[in-house]
Image: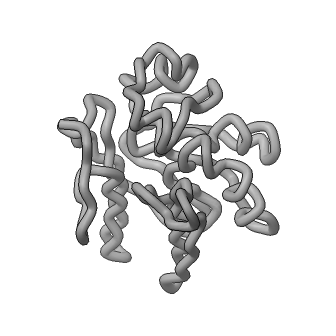
Amino acid sequence: MILIDNHDKITKFRLARTVFGRGLYFTAAYLVDGLLVDSGCAHTVNEFMVALEGSTIRSVVNTHTHEDHIAGNAHLQKKYSVRIYAHKEGLPVLANPRRVNLSLYQLVMWGYPEPSHAEPIGRILETEHYQFQIIHTPGHSLDHICLYVPNEGWLFTGDAYIGGRDRSLRA
């Protein structure tokens, strides 16, 4: 299941595997100025790729390397030849996602991503119209980053902040 919302210059994708027609454990991806922030889980990759048809995607940033944020990477690299960026601590996981042992609920909800090649992200990432400040925010994971655009008041937080009624089964 994919729910799409447009917020001015940002397109938000809420992605979840459906069980009996109901989306469970949503994750999010954002598209702004050719930059895709996160790429969803293995169970939503095909639907996500269809939803992205006609979009301009030049690069991908993973806020962290948990399985529900990185599974579209390999598909996006194949289709769009995009560059993928992540914190240096996450590069080994992107190259071999099976180095992380997933619990049963993680396998059911999100599944294992395919390997992808990523480059270490610097302190600044520029798109055609914006400059994203990269802030290392370990806690949820050692490789977690946030992307901040001060001129717009945008902060892409990955899983550093989860609002609403979301619940988690991991510490």
| Total number of numbered discs in the rendering | 0
Compared with residue 170, is residue 54 higher up or lower down, i.e. above or below? below
Q: Residue furthest front?
A: 20
Could you tell me if residue 86 is visible in this image?
no
Residue 95 figure quarter: top right
* Image-based side of 60 in relation to 154, left or right: right
Could you tell me if residue 7 is visible in this image?
yes
Please give the name of the residue rendered at 47% of the width and 36% of the height, measured from the top-left corner: 67
Please state which of residues 167 and 139 is positioned toward the viewer in this rendering. 167
Q: Residue furthest bottom?
A: 8
State the colouring used for the structure image: one colour
Q: Quadrant of the N terminus?
A: bottom right
x, y percent for residue 168: 25, 48
* Image-based side of 135 in relation to 4, left or right: left
Please state which of residues 142 and 67 is positioned toward the viewer in this rendering. 67
Q: Quadrant of the C terminus?
A: top left
Please give the name of the residue rendered at 77% of the width and 61% of the height, measured from the top-left corner: 50
Compared with residue 35, is residue 98 higher up or lower down, i.e. above or below? above
x, y percent for residue 61: 51, 46
x, y percent for residue 117: 63, 26
Please give the name of the residue rendered at 66% of the width and 48% of the height, measured from the top-left corner: 45
Please state which of residues 94 and 26 is positioned toward the viewer in this rendering. 26
Please give the name of the residue rendered at 31% of the width and 56% of the height, measured from the top-left corner: 157
Compared with residue 69, is residue 88 higher up or lower down, i.e. above or below? above
Please state which of residues 108 and 64 is positioned toward the viewer in this rendering. 108
Residue 84 figure quarter: top right
x, y percent for residue 5: 53, 79
